[in-house]
Image (spheres, rainbow, N blue to C red):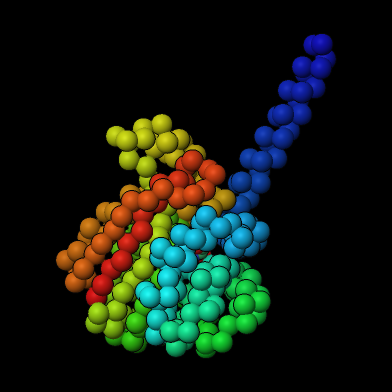
Amino acid sequence: MKCLIKTVFWLLSVFVGFIAIGLGYLKVNDTVREKFFARTMNAFSNENDTAITNIRCNQVLNHASVHGHVLEIGSGTGINFVCLHNNTRIKDYIGIEPNIHMHSYMQETINRWQIQFPVRISGVSAATMTDIESDSIDTIIMTFVLCSVPDPFAKQILLEAYRVLKPGGQFHLIEHVLSDPNIKPMTNSFQKLIEPIWTIVGDGCRFKPIVNYLDEMKTIYSNVEYENIELPVPFFIIKDGLKAVLTK
Ligand SMILES: C[S@@+](CC[C@H](N)C(=O)[O-])C[C@H]1O[C@@H](n2cnc3c(N)ncnc32)[C@H](O)[C@@H]1O
C-alpha cells in the first residue's frame, strides 16, 4: 500500500513537473505560444456550436448591422465567416490579425465558405492601423479580442476604430469579462486565481472589466450602448459577457 501511494505521488509529481515546464516554455517563447494558441483556437472554434454561433450571428453580426466596407479586429481563424459568408450587403472585408500563425487557418475558412466579396488579411496590430484611411469603414466587428490586448493598447484600438469609421459608422463587439465581485465573488476570485495560467495558454488573455473602456469612449463616440449577457459556454469563468455597439 505504502509503495502504491509512493508511486502515485511520484507519477503526479512528474505530471505536474511536465505541465510546469510546458507552461514556462510557452511563457518565454512568443512564437511557440502564438503557434500553440492558433492551433488551439482552430481546434476549438466550433461553428456547429449553435448556442454561441447564434449569439455571434444573430445578436452581434447580423446582416442588418454588418454592411459596406467591413473591418474585423482580431479575426483569428475566421470563425465569424459563418455569419458573414451569405451577407450580400458586404462590399469588402479587411481582417486585422497580428498573430500570423492564424492566417493559414483563416484562409482555409475563407476557401471553405467560398467567400464572394474581396478579402484582405493584415498582420498589423489594430492599435496602429496606419494602412487604413480615416473615415473609410462602414462597419467594424470584434469578437472576444480586448481580453487579449494589454493596456494601453485596448483603449488605443477603440480610438483607432473611431478614426477609421465613417461618420455614422458602427462598431459591433462582444467580449467575455471579469465577473462583478459583488454579484459573483467566487467566480471573480477564481478568475484572478487562474489568470496567470490563463494568460499563458490564452496568449495574453486576461479577465478585465471591459465596461471601463467603453465608458471612456462615451466622450469620443456619438453613441455607446452596451448590455451584459450570459455566454452559452460550458466553462463558468467565461460565462459573463458584454455586447456593445459604438456609433461614430
Ligand atoms: C481570443 S482570440 C478571438 C478570435 C476571434 N475573434 C474569435 O471570436 O474567436 C483574440 C484574437 O485577438 C487577436 N489580437 C490580439 N491583440 C490584437 C491587436 N492588438 N490587434 C488585433 N488583434 C489582436 C489575437 O491574435 C487573437 O486572434
Q: Place residue 99 in its image quadrant.
A: bottom right
Q: Quadrant of the N terminus?
A: top right
Left/right placement of residue 194 relative to residue 179 reads: right
For image coordinates 29% across by 58% down, the residue present is 226
Query: In which image quadrant can residue 215 be found?
Result: bottom left
Work out whether 184 lies above or below 110: above
Q: Please state if 200 lies on the left or on the right of 25 as rendered.
A: left
Residue, x 61% and y 60% (percent of image)?
A: 48
Number of numbered labels in the structure image: 0
Q: Is residue 189 above or below residue 107?
A: above
In the image, is 13 to the left or to the right of 177? right
Q: Quadrant of residue 47?
A: bottom right
Which one is in front, 62 or 210? Answer: 62
Please provide percent x and percent y for residue 230.
Answer: 41, 48
In the figure, 239 relative to 104: above or below? above
Name the residue furthest top.
1
Q: Position of residue 78 (x, y in %)?
A: 56, 71
User: Percent position (x, y) of residue 3?
Assistant: 83, 15
Residue found 77% across the figure and 23% down from its top: 8
Inspect this view and state whether residue 130 appears: no
Instruction: Indicate left or right for 192 with 107 as reference.
Output: left
